[in-house]
Amino acid sequence: MNIFRLPSLQLLSVRYNPGLTGYLPEFQETSPLKMLFLAGTSFSGELPASIGRLVSLTVLDLDSCKFTGMIPSSLSHLTQLSILDLSFNLFTGQISQSLTSLSSSLSILNLGGNNLHGPIPQMCTNPSSLRMIDLSENQFQGQIPISLANCTMLEQLVLGNNQIHDIFPFWLGALPQLQVLILRSNRFHGAIGSWHTNFRFPKLRIIDLSDNEFIGDLPSVYFQNWDAMKTCICKPPQGHAGQSNVSKPREIPDTFIAIDFSGNNFKGQIPTSIGNLKGLHLLNLGRNNITGHIPSSLMNLTQMESLDLSQNKLSGEIPWQLTRMTFLAFFNVSNNHLTGPIPQGKQFATFPNTSFDGNPGLCGSPLSRACGSSEASPSTPSSSKQGSLVNLIGNLS
């Protein structure tokens, strides 16, 4: 007998059995199934339209399988569904507008890691329970729908690695619960616009705008308003400096705080107000056109584990006060115009040559250039760690 057709079956979980293969059957209208977990198996083929008959279903987790074809619009019949996770499959086509009608019951919508394309459909046009939307690693185009401003319970919005062409969605700052905003590797452009001070992002703790086309000065007013980043956690989260793949956003601990603006065209100086964000674990401003000095106010970021200011046009000396950042595991100021002695001691004794390369005016350990009459210390072995948010959160699951 087909296990899916057991007359009293309400929960089926065969997760993380990659040797388990097969296809989903045609489902009966009388099925009492409430939770279906197939994540990490090798189930394949298309989802049958009859999956819409499972009207009692509250959880459908098909993460990391081998399903193909289009996402059936019949899923819109599953009005009790709270979690829909179809991530990391081989789904194609566009998202049916009818599917977004589930936002009144859904708390988690994860369609990341597929081959979906077209515009992102309007969401939250009715009262919504959505707390997490992940559409990353697809081929979505166009703009972010303004209807997302109605997702008042939204905590995580993950749209990275698509082809979205839009300006910075400052209006998302009105969402009272938004904590995670990941827009990396798209075609966002223009200035962020610090003048939109009514949109404060009151609970934002992770923002990743890396590898886009943003221009203008860094948004100092936003840095002043991001209150959730100002809380200093006494004991920092562990294991953030490892290198791995992106973890699922919903698995990021709520103590992790990060800003990644790397790979854009930001200019001007680093605002001293960043030093007020005392909860930061990661700050990546690398690969921009930032000028001026490294502000000594960064010494206040005592929870910092990864600081990347590389490939900019920074000048002056590295502030010795940065040696107070005793949790710092990754540091990179390479390829700037920095001068003077490299601070010594504490965490700075652990950083390799590559952290400082491309600054002809720097001297002292670990570089071979001595400062005045002092001798340089032996070089430290080079490190393969990267200071981007995508690498830092890799070990958080």
Image (cartoon, grey):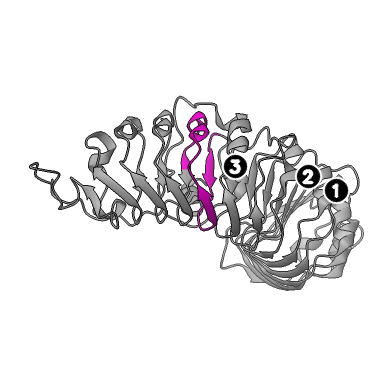
The residues tagged by marks 3 and 2 sit, at their Cα atoms, a distance apart of 28 Å
What residue would you read off at disc 2? 130
Which range is magenta?
Answer: 255-282
Q: Are marks 1 and 3 in contact (CB under 8 Å)?
A: no
What is the three-letter code of the residue carrying label 1? Cys
What is the three-letter code of the residue carrying label 2? Leu
Q: Position of residue 26 (x, y in %)?
A: 84, 69
What residue would you read off at disc 1? 124
- Find numbered disc 3 in the image and state the secondary structure of the residue it sits on: loop
Left or right: residue 83 compared with residue 239: right
Residue sitting at x 58%, y 38%: 220
- Residue 206 seen in the figure: yes
The residues tagged by marks 2 and 1 sit, at their Cα atoms, a distance apart of 8 Å
- Foreground residue among 46 and 326: 326
Left or right: residue 395 compared with residue 324: right
Task: Establish if 151 lies above or below 244.
Answer: above
**Quadrant the N terminus occupies:** bottom right
Q: Are marks 2 and 1 in contact (CB under 8 Å)?
A: yes
Q: Position of residue 108 (x, y in %)?
A: 73, 48
